Image (cartoon, rainbow, N blue to C red):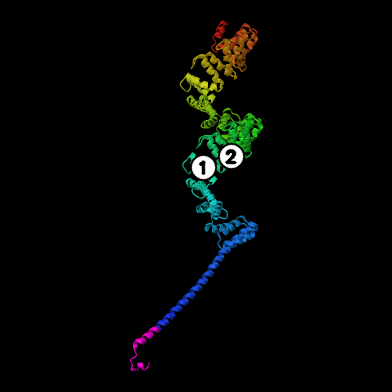
Amino acid sequence: MKQIFADGNNYPEIEIEKKRWAGRKWRMIAIIISVCFLTAFSVVQLFNGKKYAHENETVELDHTRLMNLGEQYLNKGDVERAVSYFKKSAEFGNAKAQRMLGDCYFWGEGIREDKREAVKWYLLAAGQGDAEAQRILGDCYSWGEGIREDKSEAVKWYRLAAEQGDAEAQRILVDCYKRQGDCYFLGEGIREDKREAVKWYRLAAEQGDAEAQRILGDCYFWGEGIREDKQEAVKWYRLAAEQGDAEAQRILGACYYFGTGIREDKQEAVKWYRLAAEQKNSEARWRLGDCYFWGEGIREDKREAVKWYRLAAEQKNSEARWRLGSCYYFGTGIREDKREAVKWYRLAAEQKNSEARWRLGSCYYFGTGIREDKQEAVKWYRLAAEQGNAEAQWRLGDCYFWGEGIREDKQEAVKWYRLAAEQGNAKALKELGDCYFWGEGIREDKQEAVKWYRLAAEQKNAEAQYSLGRCYYFGTGIREDKQEAVKWYRLAAEQGNAEAQWRLGACYYFGTGIREDKQEAVKWYRLAAEQGNAKAQWILGGCYFGGEGIREDKQEAVKWFRLAAGQGYVEAQRWLGDCYFFGNGVGKNKREAVNWYFLSAKKGNAEAQRRLGACFYFGHGVAKNRQEAIRWYRLAAEQGNSVAISMLKKLGVM
């Protein structure tokens, strides 16, 4: 080779190629080394990554295992060891363990009670989205347990729990919806917003929560937070009732009873009342008792009514207590026992039941079942009256009017009559009319009297109907109208008002406002007379005496005259005296005649005074006595008796 190149011609191209190969060799070596290095580094990283992943997996497994161990120990009753494991797991960040540890601190289970520490762990769990912890934390803020009370913060946590909506938190979710609704409805921790409350109640109701369904029904029923819709209310009440919610069953029964939001159906009402009553709902029990008492939706059974009243009364239901008291008072469905009645009235009255209060007052007023005590009566009437009970207001007004149990005060009476009257109490309306008519406790105003009489009369108050009839008859406070008078007299008379009966009889007798009919007159006179109305007895006696509208019968006349005279009715006393004087319907007995003339005369009856004067003058039934005769003639003459005046002239003393 050397010889070949000896001529100096070295072929430079070959040398250049050699150098190129040498450079490529070193570059290839460098690449191979780099690849090997990178491969080795990747292997190391991969090994390290697997190691770290394993460590994280171990940690996860550790705090879950710790949590599970804690629950196992808790179930075994080893609370202290459970707390130890909960704490370790909680410190690793396990949300459930944090909540469980919070519970242990809250209740002092396995560790000293510490509400603040409990809140700390609840916050950690809630912050990780634990729905139950969020709800409990809401409770803590709501009630100020372990942290300052803050309703707004409570609402925030309730909302977070409510808005999660996952299956695991379903029970809590519904509870949160209701709590959220309560907060908005009552304005607790947040501005009151009934519409927002309805929204949350609806969410809970649509998930089947019976209480929320009932509350939503209430919102529709009363138009709270939503447009009032009784039918929609009934729909939600029914859903809750069909789930066994006793209060909803009771309310649904009431809707059927009164036909509110649904067609009235007393039998269906009884069905729902019974279902609620059997669940010991006291309101339903007394309402079911009412159904039995009045025979509403079921056959009337007073004994069964008493049974249900008693069950509710024993649950301290004041409505049931006064009703049971009334059953004892009137002996309805049970043996009458006024003392037992007072006992139940008092129990209800002490619960501030206004109905029981006035009834207890009435017992004290009349001394029924307890010693009479008008002042104690006034006390109970006043308590009930101040609660707005119209019956009590009327009765308190009466006490002031007549000075019974309290100093007489007509103006105060008018005040209480008015309060009761403005509530539509018929008796108070009539009494207020009387006050205006006679100017008692208020300026006399006949037209105002007529107004109040009419209001009471339209409520079928018989006394007011009679008073209104009298106003029409005499044209007092209103234009005279005899026919309208007859109308109102009749309405009162048909209710048994004796005064109206004899006045209606008089209208028939004289043909005033109606066609004359003496027989019809006698009918109404008799009805009033049989009730002891003295004037009716005297008039009926007159009908028998003169054979007006009935066959003449002097003995029957004497009977009715005697009944009226025995009540001190002066006209009847004078007529009975006549019967004895002339022997009409009874044996003649002038001495007895003088006795009856004297009773009538001393009360101012002019004709009796004149007749008594004649008896003294002529010596009929009494020794002659000119001076005594003149005295009685003079009394009769002063009243315009013409016969007495003539006698005095004849005697030369006038």
Q: CA distance from mark 2 to mark 1?
A: 17 Å
Q: Quadrant of residue 588?
A: top right
Secondary structure at badge 1 equals helix
The residues colored magenta run: 1-21
Say what amino acid the circle numbered 1 marks: Trp
Residue at the spot x=35%, y=94% of the render? 6
The image shows residue 417, relative to residue 615, as above or below, that is below
Residue 311 x/y as whole percent: 63, 38
* Residue 189 visible within the image: yes
Residue 500 is left or right of residue 15, and the answer is right
Question: Toward the viewer: 317 or 386?
Answer: 317
Please state, as top left, top right, bottom left or bottom right, where the C terminus lies in the image.
top right
Question: Toward the viewer: 87 or 541?
Answer: 87
The disc, 2 or 1, on the residue closer to the chain's N-terminal end is 1
Residue position marked by numbered label 2 in the rendering: 275
Residue 145 x/y as whole percent: 57, 53
Residue at the spot x=53%, y=41% of the render? 238
The image shows residue 428, relative to residue 81, as above or below, that is above
Please say whether residue 427 is one of the residues in the magenta stretch.
no
Please say whether residue 17 is one of the residues in the magenta stretch.
yes
Residue at the spot x=57%, y=63% of the render? 61
CA neighbours of label 1 inside 10 A, class few (<14), some (14 to 19), many (20+): many
Residue at the spot x=57%, y=14% of the render? 540
Residue 94 x/y as whole percent: 56, 60
Question: Toward the viewer: 39 or 270?
Answer: 39
The image shows residue 246, relative to residue 433, as above or below, that is below
Numbered label attached to residue 521: none
Secondary structure at badge 2 equals helix
Residue position marked by numbered label 1 in the rendering: 236
Say what amino acid the circle numbered 2 marks: Leu
- SS majority, magenta: helix
Please state, as top left, top right, bottom left or bottom right, where the N terminus lies in the image.
bottom left
